[in-house]
Image (cartoon, rainbow, N blue to C red):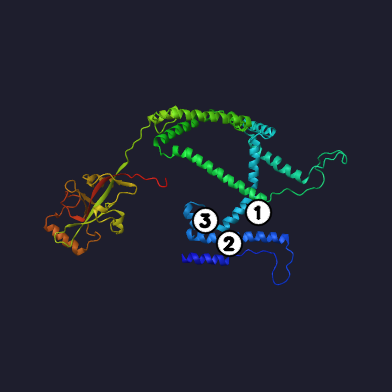
Amino acid sequence: MEDFASNFLTAINEAPLPQCDGGEDDGHQKAEPDPTKKGRGFRGGIFSAANLQDSLLEKLLSQVIPAEDGQGQHLNDLRGSDMPAYASERPGFSLPLMTANFRRFNARIGVVFSFQTRVFRLLSWRRPTQTLSLLAVYTFVCLDPYLLLALPLAIALFGILVPSFVTRHPAPSSDPDRVRNLGYSPRGPPLAPARTVKPAKELSRDFFRNMGDLQNVMEDFSVAHDKIVALVVPKTNFSDEALSSAVFVLLSAACLVMLIAGHLLPLRFLALAGGWAGICSGHPAVARWIQQAQRQYTEETQEQQQDNNTEKQPKWYHPSSLLQTLLSDIHLDLSPETREVEIFELQRLSHSLSSGEWEPWLFSPSPYDPLSAARIAGDRPQGTRFFEDVLPPEGWEWSEKKWALDLWSREWVEERIITGVEVETEGERWVYDMWSGGEAGVEEGEESGSAQQQQQQGRLRPGVSWEEGEEGTGRRGQWRRRRWVRMVKRKKVSSEGS
């Protein structure tokens, strides 16, 4: 908090103060105020105050937003590591830079809003001749789609080049009493400057008009976004699995039909009819008729809902009979998915004891067989010492209370193609390592002593190899393991932010 206070005071001290060019008060008589200098001073004071506010907000946000590590590293962490190379070189968030970019953007966005206004005027039938001309061009393009390639060229010719030429070579004034044979002639040198697109000046009327249009566009986008989300997302995010499954079936069938019979559809006439219907719906008379029909339909729907309040309708009720039939035929499996998990209990032969007993070592996800990568590399087995510390996989939970010993030890050994082991088919189902004289981790003295003890106990038959001996008749290695299994089920994930 002390660092924030010191940074705050430093920003105040370093920020430029507003200056006015109204004159100096040094004992002499003040000069008459200049309106031009006064306006510049007022404007400079506004921008200085804005710079002061920006610097204070930047200091405040620097305490909240984590500092960046390198060029755009924080931006990469927020948006992911799949960003292109040029995006990593872009600057991070900066309030003065954001303010400057917004001013430049707002000064140049007027062309877009001007084009948007002209399109709205064209579609609203304010000048029927222009709208009918648009329909004529649209009709020719629909009947002959190859004209669509020439349409951008025609727009560039008659919408950009011809008006620019007329601007430089304007028509003469129409005064028949003074000038005879009036008519447009492109001869002679240019009479007017070329037409250019200049950004709007800051604090001008056009600048604030662009800000108002930009504000309204953001509101329109937010409203449209919310309506689309409210209409589409509940039907496609499987919150109601029966409804989303029915939509999936319908879309799959429609996709299959389009892949097979899509070339049979009269696309030109469909586009022609759709374009005429969309443009004609903007006519004032048609618009009034549509609003009246919509109002009448809304009233009838409300009356039907009031009449059906006593009837219990299902949650997924939909007026479409096809969708309703699909919903009645869809049966969801509500039982969670189950899988089997395994763990291997490893034990090691203790040569320090006179009897050579097996001591519990740990529970490992791998059997740690003699030819495993960990054994060959000389690594120790990985796992946990206690059975209670074995956790289910991420996203799963236990569906059984206890672990069960796998009695079919030969099957999982053959399934993993494990060699160099002895398999118990009865009893505790241990799988032993075969003994080798150079086995890692056992000293030579301990090996000889253990061999003598085992030979004395009758566990080793001289002259009989491991492969030729029967189960339990050969000399066993340093490790043994057995497999435990347990069932898990998918864990239900709670929705966050709902």
Amino acid on which disc 1 is placed:
Leu
Q: In the rendered view, does 26 fall on the left or right side of 341?
A: right
Residue 383 as seen in the image, left or right of residue 461 = right
| Residue 481 visible in the shown view | yes
Residue at 42% in and 47% down: 497
Q: Secondary structure at mark 1?
A: loop
Amino acid residing under circle 2: Leu
Mark seen at residue 52: 2
**Where, quadrant-wise, is the C terminus in this rendering?**
top left
> Which residue is the site of mark 1?
203
Q: Earlier in the sequence, mark 3 or mark 2?
A: 2
* Pointer 1 with pointer 2, Cβ within 8 A: no
Q: Calculate the distance from the C-alpha at mark 3 to the C-alpha at mark 2.
A: 30 Å
Judged by depth in the image, the label closer to the viewer, 3 or 2, is: 2
Label 3 sits on residue: 88
Mark 3–mark 1 distance (CA, rounded to whole Å)? 34 Å
Image quadrant in which you'd find residue 143: top right
- Who comes first in sequence, dot 1 or dot 2? 2
Left or right, 124 with respect to 34, comes to left
SS state under label 2? helix
Q: Position of residue 140 (x, y in %)?
A: 65, 31
Residue shown at the point (65%, 42%) measured from the top left: 115
Place of residue 482 in the rendered image (x, y in percent of width and height, measured from the top left) = 22, 50
Left or right: residue 111 versus residue 431 is right
User: Height in image: 144 above or below 439?
Assistant: above
**C-alpha gap between disc 1 and disc 2:** 18 Å
* Residue 419 visible in this rendered orientation of the protein: no
